[in-house]
Image (cartoon, rainbow, N blue to C red):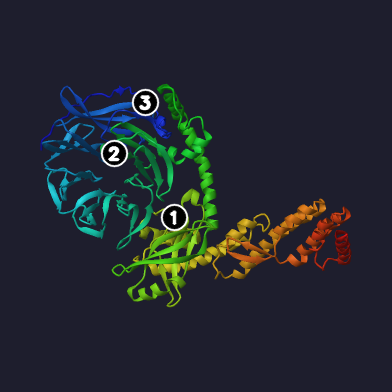
Amino acid sequence: MKKKILLSLALVFIVSLNLYSQTKFDDAVALNFKNTTVAVAGYFDEGNNLVTARQIAKEGSYYLEIGRYDENGQYTVKKIIELNNDPVEVKVKFNNDGSKAAILEISPDKIALSYVDISSGEILQDFKLESVNNFFLTPDGRYIVVAAGSGSLLFDIAEGDPILNYSGEITYGISGDGNTLFCRNGNNIDYLETKTGKKIRSFPMKDLKSIDFDSRGEIMLCLTSEGIKLIKLTQESIICLKEIDGVPVMPVASSLYDYFIVDNGAVRGVYNLGGVQIYKSRIDTYNANKSVFVFSKDDKRMALLSDKGIYAYDFDMIKYYNKIAQKYPDLFVTKTQFENDQDQENRASRVKFQKGTMVSNVADEMKVSEGIIKQVQKNSLGLVDVKVTGLGYYNPNTEMYDVTMNVPVDYLNTVSVTAKVKVPKFQAEIFSRNYQNFKAFALRQINRDQTGVDVFGITIVNDLNSTNYRCIMHRTLPPVKLSYDEEFANGQKFFEMRNWYETLLNISDFPEDFKKNSVIDYLFTQAITNFFDEKWNYVQTLNPVKDSTQLLIYLSDFPKNFRLADEVNRLRQTVVNNIMETRLDRLNQYLSDKEYLDGVEYAKVVTPQYFDPYSGTSIDYEYYKTRFIPAYNSILFAAGKRAYDGTNWKLALDMLQQISQSYPDYSEVEKMITDAKYQLQK
């Protein structure tokens, strides 16, 4: 094996760079610097400092310079490695700790791939290849996978020779442990065992333009002609978790799949896993084909290495940007024109100086807020009716029906969504004829603005043959990054802990091919019963007067077959009575204050029935006749007598004629009515 000691510049020196805040592009979360240097690769070290590799030329030779940026954007050269020739393009991939790297040099007449020890500058291996599309290092540093032409090769780095040919398999990614390759073979996605080439699983993926995998291959981010899709593996197939609208380009996923970055021209959008946009800004346009995104392992930092330079970001600043911008408006002013670069540098320096304090303060506030949100989510969890409104295509091979449903997005509004339902072939005709009569229910919990949480666990009930159809998949909760086996294990753990809320979150929305669905159905039934028992105990602690609206909301969450349904309805009646009694108190106050006509007008809000929009029912005000009617008669009498005494005969008649005969002094009312009519006829 050819060995060559590369040019090793003995020591480390500091390069002074012009640092600019990216705020002039309204991207106020740029970490500390924008550097016009062009880098081809990078990673974040254990201290979350950015390490980059860039191609340089010196005295007719070409080198790869490895250097590190500190928190303040200062750059230190760590190593300079001589390249074989003048490459048109250089691609670099570092191993897990950055101690070694694979370097691909592409020239018009030559391709060179080498594996280098960064600290010593020694080339550990050269690989002989005619073409390379992409390459991947295994975390243990023993192997390199090269996608070339219509297949892929596995090289033993120590030996330098290919030891396995994955014929027809184009590698798109490698798992975090290095044991699995994610490949495309025609219209199929194949998962291969790295060291044997054994096909672990395969599934069709037509109309695929681009695809990215999380570290375990459990979640996939796909770009198709229809848009962006988030897909998750089941035990035997795949299901679409989310379709993200309005995203025309392939997003870039962060290390832990917590975020997606979508740079579309001069606009950046940052999305969370639930597909909710958490940040938007203008950015400097760049050539996406000559750019690389780098993420820290903990998803705290991000860098864009583009043809325009290096931009570094802090995800905490992105995540909390809106809150920080409100608290520190002088530092985060968008669409501001600066007179010169110094103004930009001054603001960047202030942000850099205060960043730690700002993020810490906001993070503390958000933790409190998130705790409150989580408690509200738990309290708001309910079982609600869902309406099946349409039936689409039935695929006899997968036994899946496309169905359209109206699902709630809050307590008062619904949206139309499409999901898939597993219906066996022998039941398909019954389903198609009767679906509009089938009942459907779902779990609903509120806090959409903060978390994207809406509806999950949708089930369609076929009363004709006592069959429940599990919807696959409409889940507006953010996709879970755990495997289904791990979710199931979590659900069992929380069930044993009698934490019914977390149990329901973890055992909902399992695909139809999951092997333990019978156990899940049992756990779900038990958990939902116990959860509502606990919720009933909580609801009873609320004040029917002060918490009337909240009580009506929570009472609407209880299923109709709840074992204490009569008590739920009775409490709803009590709340309605209290709402009306409060209004009645206000009416009596008008009487005490002698604001009779205002009181008569206000009395319109005290009605025989109260429509509860949350349960969709009208509830009688039980004391309408015994309490409201006497109070209303009194204020009508007071208003009529005042008009009568003031000789306003028309108004007097209008008030007095509304008084019911149950009024104690109705004989006096009749006398005034007779006299008023006489006066009007004179």
Q: Is residue 512 above or below residue 126?
A: below
Q: Quadrant of residue 83?
A: top left
- How many angstroms separate mark 2 from mark 1 (CA)? 31 Å
Q: Residue at x 36, y 73 (%)?
A: 428
Label 3 or label 2, whichever comes before in sequence order: 3
Query: Left or right: where does residue 550 sit relative to residue 29?
Result: right
Residue 622 seen from this side: yes
Query: Left or right: where does residue 680 sit relative to residue 455?
Result: right
Residue 288 — which label? Answer: 2
Residue 486, percent across and down?
Answer: 37, 58
Secondary structure found at label 3 = loop
Question: Mark 1 sits on what residue?
Answer: 477
- How many angstroms separate mark 1 from mark 3 (CA)? 41 Å
Residue 363, percent across and down?
Answer: 49, 40
Q: Quadrant of residue 649?
A: bottom right
Label 2 or label 1, whichever comes before in sequence order: 2
Residue 537 — which label? Answer: none
Q: Inspect the image, locate mark 3, and give the three-letter code of the amino acid beneath it.
A: Leu
Q: Inspect the image, locate mark 1, and give the three-letter code of the amino acid beneath it.
A: Leu
- How many angstroms separate mark 3 from mark 2 (CA)? 23 Å
Residue 673, percent across and down?
Answer: 85, 63
Task: Please give the count of numbered marks on the rendered protein.
Answer: 3
| Mark 3 closeness class: few <14, some 14–19, many ≥20 residues within 10 Å | some
Residue 503 seen from this side: no
Residue 352, percent across and down?
Answer: 44, 29
Q: Quadrant of residue 471?
A: bottom left
Question: Mark 3 sits on what residue?
Answer: 19
Secondary structure found at label 2 = helix
Q: Inspect the image, locate mark 2, and give the three-letter code of the amino acid beneath it.
A: Ala
Q: Quadrant of the C terminus?
A: bottom right
Q: Is residue 315 above or below residue 202?
A: above
| Mark 2 closeness class: few <14, some 14–19, many ≥20 residues within 10 Å | some
